[in-house]
Amino acid sequence: MKLSLLLVWVLVIGSALAQIAVAHQHRQRVQQWQQLESRRDGLQQEQTRLQLELSTLTSYARIDQRARNELNMTEPGDIRTLTP
Amino acid sequence: MTEPQQEYTSQGISHWRYWMVVAVMAALLLVILVRLVALHTVDQPFLYEEGEKRTIRSQVEPARRGTITDRFGEPLAVSTAVVDISINPSRFKLENAAPLAKVLGLKANSLHQRIESAQARGRGFLYIERQVQPDIADRVAELGLSGVQLEQKFRRYYPAAEVTAHVVGLVNIDSNGQEGLELAYNDYLTGTGGRRTVVKDRYGRVIKQVAVDAIAEPGKDLRLTLDLRLQYLAYRELMAAVQQHKAHSGSAVMLDAKTGEVLAMVNQPSYNPNNRAELNPEQMRNRAIADVVEPGSTMKPFTIAAALDSGRYTPSTKVDTSPGYLRVRNKTIRDHRDYGVLDVTGVITKSSNVGVTLLSADLGAETIWKTMTAAGLGQASGIGFPGESVGVLPYPSEMDDLRLATLSYGYGLAVSPLQLAQSYTSFTEHGCRRPATLLLDSGTDNSCQQVMSAATARKVLDILETVTSDLGTGRRARVPGYRVGGKTGTAHKVGQTGYEDSSYTAVFAGIAPISDPDLVLVVVIDDPQGREYYGGEVAAPVFSRIMEQALRLRQVAPDDAAHTTPLRMAGGPK
């Protein structure tokens, strides 16, 4: 009788401690998940920013102007077309 | 111990005093008890809720709007994260206005005044600045001012700006589509925002997620059939032409001849959708779809196609157009000069009004109408663009001989540049017209409509090629190395008193290369002011410049033997 009471007591304490440990772990995981999510958002922002930068730098209007004005390129004049 | 000691006994204190102390103590205990019971029963739900309110937060995540790209994935409309900064004026200290203004780059005085007047009127919400870059918003958050709220939003950015403005359209500050495809596909592009309930500790960290109320679903991406390279060069050439001729406006539509996909669609004047401050409805209309023009002589190939398809004419059938004019009812239909006896091919080459009038009178209204209807004129294109014009095509029953005659050379009906381009795909795909599409893989029915027989279509193509020959009206539409066909058109504009004498619409609709058509291009220049106003003088050169570069970009093999050299030169590529 005394032994089983002791066993129940040990079990109750044990499960209580386990509960605390699990709750703590859960908190840490949620925090981690939050951090990863905000990192994902940050990367996504960075990606759209880079995408916009790329399309601005490679826009045809810009390349056209720089080719004409800075590199003094012209459209080919005498085009000869070769057929096999 | 000089004073006599007093003796305290129970007899010395009266009984009522003792009991009073006990009663007061008991009453206090009772009060505490009642309070405790009340807190635990009556007030419990309220208190519980208040406690939750201080730790439980509802987090809203805005959904990202889908990206719009061209056919190769070049971005045309992209959403980037920004932050809306607002305050609760009643909780905001006025002396904090200056540092806030400094970080945001606003004028401290005017911000001070705005907040002061909002406070005076007792308002609970005031936008300080919307669509702030995230890094600046971070610095506002670092100030840690009370009463300041940051809300994550998205801002739409259009990398190709003016070049694609009319097709893509734009959104308002709340990311709702206002124009163009942004409006037509608003629901498709808009995602649904997510919401979840979380528990936060006093540092604002999330410690527990209670429930997910709505899962954020980002908007879907839209892929257009446009080719940004072709779009850009069409825009550049059209703009140059509109400026050169001081025209009122202009449009160009380029279709893939085999699929009906819209590869380029540009208009002048255009606008920059990234700068909402200077918007003007006149610039925002997508004229290629929303405006109609009288197509003029560009309709003649359909009269010819009807004639050839009837089996009663061949390209070499003789038509006597002398003396160069013809009276129908009370109107005289004129050619530029007396062309005498032409064959059916020559009627198109010379663009003879008298010739097509004779043909149409012989064929009858029903036949002409059937061909033009099958070609999609006067009908919605099904492209799904807001504000599309259906155009006007009169019914055979409404047509007397005069209206039939004018219809045969392109007056008395109205078509949009898109409809015109679409109708010309009748000639390229063995007589089967492809409906124009703007979305890649849209899953819509792309089956074609038979307008004429394949043999007729081939003959019309060959006839159209003669227009760019030395004898034709569209010589300036030629492209070196390629066989090009098309039709010029010049229509008097309709003013308040009927057709105006000195106001024109110059049109060129063409196809290249003729041996195996790849592109259909329509150029419309509205109201050119210079000495040149004919379609062959104003629109045809634009067609030539756009087409030449487009064919090269698309790596279409040259098919004009007269302008190519066989690959046998010494030192040439092997």
Image: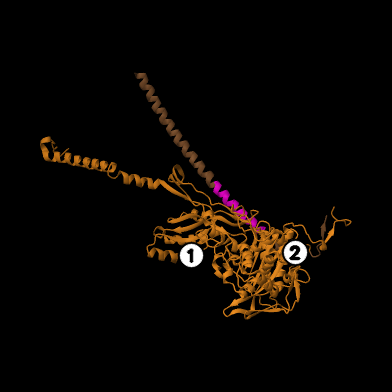
Does the magenta segment cover residue B500? Answer: no
Q: Position of residue B568 (x, y in %)?
A: 87, 56
Q: Position of residue B304 (x, y in %)?
A: 69, 67
Using the rendered image of the protein, determine whether residue B289 is visible from the camera's viewpoint: yes
Nearer the observer, B252 or B366: B366
Query: Could you tell me which secondary element the residue under label 2 belongs to?
Result: helix
Residue drawn 41% across and 29% down? A15
Q: Quadrant of residue B361?
A: bottom right
Residue B538 marker: none
Please state if B201 lies on the left or on the right of B369 as rendered: left
- What kind of residue is marked 2? Asp
Q: Which residues are magenta?
A: A39-59
Mark 1 touches mark 2? (CB < 8 Å): no
Residue drawn 82% across and 63% down? B562
According to the image, label 1 marks what residue?
Answer: B108
The chain drawn in orange is: B
Q: Earlier in the sequence, mark 1 or mark 2?
A: 1
Q: Quadrant of residue B416?
A: bottom right
How would you classify the magenta stretch by its main secondary structure? helix
The colour chain A appears in is brown
- What kind of residue is marked 1? Ala
Q: Position of residue B74 (x, y in %)?
A: 64, 55
Q: Chain of mark 2?
A: B
Crowding around mark 1 (Cα neighbors within 10 Å: few <14, some 14 to 19, many 20+) is some
Query: Could you tell me which secondary element the residue under label 1 belongs to?
Result: helix
Nearer the observer, B180 or B5: B180
Front label number (1 vs 2): 2
Q: Is the N terminus of chain B in the top left, top right, bottom left or bottom right quadrant?
A: top left
Q: Chain of mark 1?
A: B
Q: Position of residue A33 (x, y in %)?
A: 51, 42
According to the image, label 2 marks what residue?
Answer: B462
Using the rendered image of the protein, determine whether residue B394 is visible from the camera's viewpoint: no
